[in-house]
Image: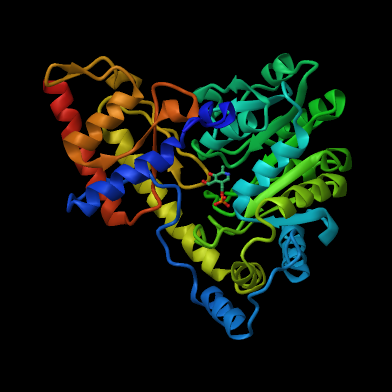
């Protein structure tokens, strides 16, 4: 089959590939500890499921407006208001996950050859989505010592005549780090000066620890808000990854363009899932707090456990549900005659030797790190850490 150049240039999602390996091993009866997956292990709270059942009973099974029901867009506005962000329903689009919001945005913003600044380590899909839109991803690395966020000067330096947009992802996947306010301010100023759109992916902003308060770049100044697309959704906050509801809020012309594109691709996101998302956003928020607290305990277990492993150093990330340890000291070591040369071979070794699934840092654009999701039970985290400790002994003694 002759496929388009467009799709042949796209790399499949490395994180979904790890998920697939784990599923396959489990189907074969192998007991794998999965630190690969990027979704909460909790079930969707009951009142949200009940709202979906009610929507079915009421026959809400028809097309809705492409950008989502008015009820959902109003609930999204109220959700944004909780963060100090004021939007009207005309400035909001609901889509099939935050993923579709971002995909739409790149499609309507980029002409062939337009550039997007992507800080590294980055979430795997940004680069491929930019490529699918005919754009060019310009990677701007951040140092571990700075919490992996890119220096403002580096963003300015990489900004050229073709730069159209810059990505902000705070808290970050894969690092769990937050962008400091001063950096957000600098990005806003750069965007105003160079006429950039800021794509602010805030999907993990309710999963934060140690009392930190995330801030949206759009909340810092009206001129920043005027060129920002705030991206969020219910997947991570409400344990609703499978329901596929995300949202974008931004300038009305951008939202209208995205809605127009969506009207010719998927049309509205699933009508029952939209009703469930309304219940999530407008219903009791204690469920979120309970999950957040559990994630914080697990974060502590994971980070402390990782730092006890010889050759592993891990920062204590204040958000999301990922640890991103530095494993550079493990590279170059041998196992059964084979040398672990990079994060990919290390991840393969860990899966084969101890049945622990992790994602290699290179999938996020940086070598010498691994990403471990702690969205799994405390028992599984303890078991996984124990196995990792054993694996490192094999590495050391080889
Ligand atoms: C940084 C980031 N943005 C967006 C998404 C997509 O979320 P959704 O499930 O709403 O499409 C993810 C999911 O892994 C993510 O990690």
* The quarter of the displayed image where residue 314 is located: top left
Residue 241 percent across, percent down from the top left:
50, 57
Residue 324 vs residue 158, the one in the foreground: 158
Q: Residue at x 61, y 59 (%)?
A: 245
> How is colour applied across the structure in the image?
rainbow
Q: Residue at x 74, y 57 (%)?
A: 80
> Is 249 rendered above or below residue 119?
below
> Is 152 rendered above or below residue 129?
above
Q: Is residue 193 left or right of residue 278?
A: right
Q: Is residue 108 left or right of residue 282?
A: right
Residue 63 vs residue 193, the one in the foreground: 63
Q: Is residue 226 left or right of residue 304?
A: right
Q: Residue at x 52, y 43 (%)?
A: 318
Q: Is residue 242 left or right of residue 382?
A: right
* The quarter of the displayed image where residue 286 is located: bottom right
The quarter of the picture where the C terminus appears is: top left
- The answer to whether residue 32 is seen in the rendering is no
Residue 264 vs residue 253, the one in the foreground: 264
> Is 234 rendered above or below residue 125?
below
Residue 205 percent across, percent down from the top left:
61, 50
Residue 222 percent across, percent down from the top left:
88, 43
């Amino acid at each position: 089959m002759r496929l388009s150049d467009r799709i042949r240039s796209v790399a499949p999602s490395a994180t979904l590939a790890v998920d697939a390996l784990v599923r396959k091993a489990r189907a074969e009866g192998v007991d794998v500890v999965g630190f690969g997956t990027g979704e909460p292990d909790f079930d969707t709270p009951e009142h949200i499921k009940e709202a979906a059942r009610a929507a079915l009973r009421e026959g809400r099974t028809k097309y809705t407006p492409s950008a989502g029901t008015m009820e959902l867009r109003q609930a999204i506005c109220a959700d944004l208001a909780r963060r100090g962000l004021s939007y009207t329903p005309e400035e909001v689009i609901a889509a099939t996950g935050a993923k579709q919001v971002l995909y739409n945005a790149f499609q309507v913003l980029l002409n062939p050859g337009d550039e997007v600044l992507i800080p590294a380590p980055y979430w795997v899909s940004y680069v491929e989505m930019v490529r699918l839109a005919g754009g060019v991803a310009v990677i701007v690395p951040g140092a571990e010592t700075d919490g992996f966020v890119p220096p403002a000067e580096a963003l300015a330096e990489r900004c050229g005549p073709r730069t159209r947009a810059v990505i902000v992802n705070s808290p970050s996947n894969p690092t769990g780090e937050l962008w400091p306010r001063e950096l957000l301010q600098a990005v806003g100023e750069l965007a105003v000066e160079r006429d950039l759109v800021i794509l602010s992916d805030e999907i993990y902003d309710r999963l934060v620890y140690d009392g930190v308060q995330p801030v949206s770049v759009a909340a810092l100044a009206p001129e920043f808000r005027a060129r920002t697309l705030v991206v969020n959704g219910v997947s991570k906050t409400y344990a609703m990854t499978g329901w596929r509801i995300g949202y974008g809020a931004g300038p009305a012309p951008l939202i209208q363009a995205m809605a127009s594109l969506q009207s010719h691709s998927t049309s509205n996101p699933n009508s029952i899932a939209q009703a469930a998302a309304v219940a999530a956003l407008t219903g009791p928020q204690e469920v979120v707090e309970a999950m957040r607290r559990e994630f914080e305990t697990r974060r502590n277990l994971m980070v402390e456990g990782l730092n006890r492993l010889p050759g592993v150093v891990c920062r204590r990330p204040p958000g999301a549900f990922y640890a991103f340890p530095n494993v550079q000291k493990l590279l170059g070591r041998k196992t059964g005659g084979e040398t672990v040369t990079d994060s990919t071979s290390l991840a393969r070794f860990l899966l084969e030797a101890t049945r622990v699934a992790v994602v290699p840092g290179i999938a996020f654009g940086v070598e010498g790190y691994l990403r471990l999701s702690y969205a799994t039970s405390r028992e599984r985290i303890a078991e996984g850490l124990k196995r990792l400790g054993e694996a490192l002994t094999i590495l050391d003694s080889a």
